Image: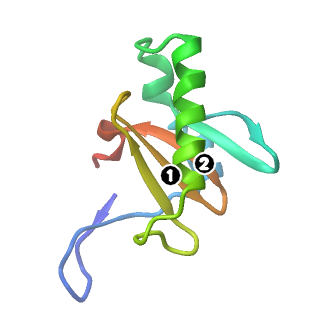
Amino acid sequence: MIQTENEDDVPLIYRLGLPEAERAGLIVRTGTAGDVNVYVSRRLMDEGTYSLKMRRDMIDRGFRLLSRPYPDDMDQLHVRYIDVYEVWVIRIDEGITFLKGDDLEA
């Protein structure tokens, strides 16, 4: 959902928590890394473009990228782009999610 009524009149994407997104079938929980849930978007999972080996490499790369601090990081939001796979990895308190750019479109 897009909301456009804010002080800057900039579109905002409605926040859907990871548990709600999982129940809605938008993401799939693939496991945990320590005590952090790891999710992959349904589109990325169903696309069939990536073999199991490639998905493991993608997740390893995502974790390595997230382990490095960046100046734009916020306390509870870390976003990285894995260019080799054209995949975004996002870390919030609820978990880590891997998704394609198309998954971000409203």
Of the numbered discs 1 and 2, the one sitting upstream in the chain is: 1
Counting from the top left corner in percent of width and height, residue 54 is at 51, 17
Counting from the top left corner in percent of width and height, residue 93 is at 65, 63
Spot the residue most to the bottom: 7
Which of the labelled discs sits on residue 90, or is there none? 1
Q: Is residue 2 above or below residue 52?
A: below
Identified at 50% across, 61% down, the residue is 78
Identified at 81% across, 46% down, the residue is 34
Q: Are marks 1 and 2 in contact (CB under 8 Å)?
A: yes
Q: Is residue 46 above or below residue 39?
A: above
Distance in Å between CA atoms under marks 1 and 2: 6 Å
The residue that disc 2 covers is 96
User: Amino acid under label 1?
Assistant: Ile
Counting from the top left corner in percent of width and height, residue 25 is at 55, 34
Q: Determine the secondary structure under disc 1.
A: strand
Q: Is residue 99 left or right of residue 105?
A: right
Which of the labelled discs sits on residue 4, or is there none? none
Q: Which quadrant holds residue 92?
A: bottom right
Counting from the top left corner in percent of width and height, residue 81 is at 38, 45
Identified at 51% across, 10% down, the residue is 51
Quadrant where the N terminus is found in the figure: bottom left
| Residue situated in front as seen by the camera: 106 or 80 | 80
